[in-house]
Image: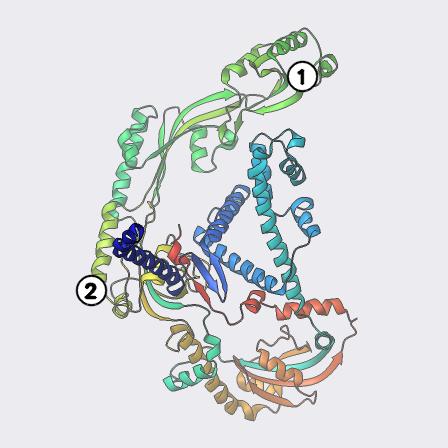
Amino acid sequence: MATLEKIRSKSVFLIIVIGVALLAFIVGDALTNSQNIFGDRTTVAKVGGVKIDYTEYQRKREQLNEQLEQARRQNPQQYANFDTQLLPQMALDQLISEALVRNAADKAGIRSSSNLLRHYMLDNPQSQQVMNIVRQLNASGLSVQTPQQAYEIIFNPKRNGLTDAQMEPFQRAWIAAEREMEGQITAMVYQRLLAGTVRANDLDKKMLYDNYINTSNVELAYLPFGELSEKEYPVTEAEVKAAYDKDKNLFKVEEATKEISFIAVNVAPSAEDKAAAQKLAEATAHSLAANAGALDKNLKKEGVDMQRHSLRASDLPAGPVKDYLLAAASDSVKLISSNARGFQIIRMGSRTSEIDSIQVNVVSAATEDLGLRVMARLNGGLPVDSLTSTFSVDSVVPQLDQWITLYTADGPTNALPDATIDSLRNAGGKFISLQAGPQGMVMAQLVKQNAPVTIYEYDEATFELGPSAKTLSAEREKLEKFLAANTDAEKFAENAAKAGYNLQNFTVTASTPAIPRFQGFNQYYPESRQVMRWVMIDGKEGEVSHIYEYKDHNAPALYVAAVGSEYDDFCPVTNKDVKSVLERKVRAEKAGDKLLAKYSKNVQSIAAAAQAMKVTPTNLPTFRFSSQSGVNDPEVTGIIAGAKADKKVNIVKGQDGIYVYQVMGRSTEKFPYNDSQYEQQYYRLVNPDLDGMLRGNSKLKNNIYKFEAGE
């Protein structure tokens, strides 16, 4: 009873506790569901049911960064100007392609075989993770050269004098690499199967063969439309709309799209900045001359860079610098160049005569005591090539006739200290100790040295001219005034040119890596990814962004964008590019009709038609039904290929002009049929979009700008 009374007395408290717990459950469930309702917060992109998670996106970005760094090390000139703004979308494109294939392969029940996995993990390693594991093992002090050796150590640690605990991290990494490789193998197998579905049948191959061997002798007169005059061929809005409705599917977009106007202000040094740079050059030259090459610290604060060089004559930079140094007096100073990019000043130091390389014999000994005995024997007359027969091979290692470079095109190598070089020269051909200690001893003997060369020691002061903070501030203030007076996209676009700004119009999506320099070209404004983020995430139709800055000292820029319109199904007829294409098409139709009516009476012969059209007739003796027919219009190519060889003169309207043609005859070339050749030709002609086949009608939802704006 007492217990029951206690429960009753606490009932209100229990109800509150249960209520709070139930509320927490409901709220927690609501928060979980809200991620599905309002969007998965870790999904970078989605195509149909395929999602790309942020963690795998990060991993792919890191891989691409590593690959770029490696490429830059191997080909520095080729990749020096690679725009890293491309990397985020490159990573996402690869992930989407891989995910689509994996998803399709999983549905098809395709799995990797153990033989294939072994081949790509061990025999012919393709996994970057495996190579990373090999490097990590070596970094841990375990010497492995191949994936097979790595596998043996990782999964048989006791056999190799190690413990399971030591190898556990490597085992996990290896298993993860196997899983990733299984996915890659599965994708590869499926891609091959998918590509194999695009096969030519016997009729397709026979058609391609016939199109090649069957030729026609065609006489042709072609009059291009040229520039279609708006005045001569006016186009109404209704005609453009009708053309749009007819070919609307050509303007379908695969993801959310926005039309933007963009202004980039490239800030250049002002006249005042250039005058200040000239004074700075004078002050720098005076400082170098007065202080024996020392540069005043205040000049360094102004941005003057100072470097000291010691170069051979053959390595001096070609041009005015070399010309000056070869004849300059010591301590003289000269202004080499001064222009809109900055200045360069050279101070001649001294000329010295130095040896730029020496040849030595090097001997390493396992212990210092052994090294002293070896060196005594060598200096007592023992030939170097007799070392291995006199001492243990494992304890003494000779390296004969080794060249040591002391100067390169970059200056002194500091391969050996000056004192060591002097000791070698003064040793009279005997061995001297280079290094000795608990780890052993290294000794060397001078064999030969090159003839001395002249070394030029000089100071180089450079300054890169960029706009001052005052100049940049003035340009920003001017742009801010323009934005204050033009607060919406319509006014922004209408008044930009009047204010002296170059306005560019672009059609962009979240898959656009940055703001393009030109529509359709793979070149982007530096650090303009930040502007693209505003456009795709924050910018609404009609809005204008704030000012973004590209903070480069020498060539800073100010960016502003305005969103004109946005859509996610079809590019509208109001789009400037769409409208331009449609107007050109309508004008071409009108021009074709007009020219047909004008020249139809002159088609008695090719010569007469050509004379009337004031063009030169063309003979196509081996006209084929192909892209290399000699006729640029594919529709007209088909018409001529299907015409009878009756020598009848015909006139037809094409997409780019009017054609008068006459099929004089046909012939068949003797050419052997090759089934494999036409199989490959068919595939090249079809050029299947495998990603598109897997994507189908699913749209891409790209959230990449929600996660990063790029470098």
Amino acid type indicated by mark 1: Val
Q: Could you tell me residue 677's position as x and y percent?
A: 73, 67
**Front: mark 1 or 2:** 1
Say whether residue 528 is left or right of residue 311: left
User: Closer to the camera, 571 or 279?
Assistant: 571
Colour scheme of the rendered structure: rainbow
Is label 2 in a helix, a strand or a loop? helix
Residue at the spot of label 2: 485
Q: Quadrant of residue 302?
A: top left
User: Closer to the camera, 206 or 620?
Assistant: 206
Amino acid type indicated by mark 2: Ala
Query: Any mark on residue 151, and which?
Result: none
Up the image or down, 352 lies above or below 272; here it is: above
Q: Could you tell me residue 215's position as x and y percent?
A: 71, 78
Q: Could you tell me residue 336's position as x and y percent?
A: 38, 37
Residue at the spot of label 1: 396
Indicate which disc, 1 or 2, sits on the residue closer to the N terminus.
1
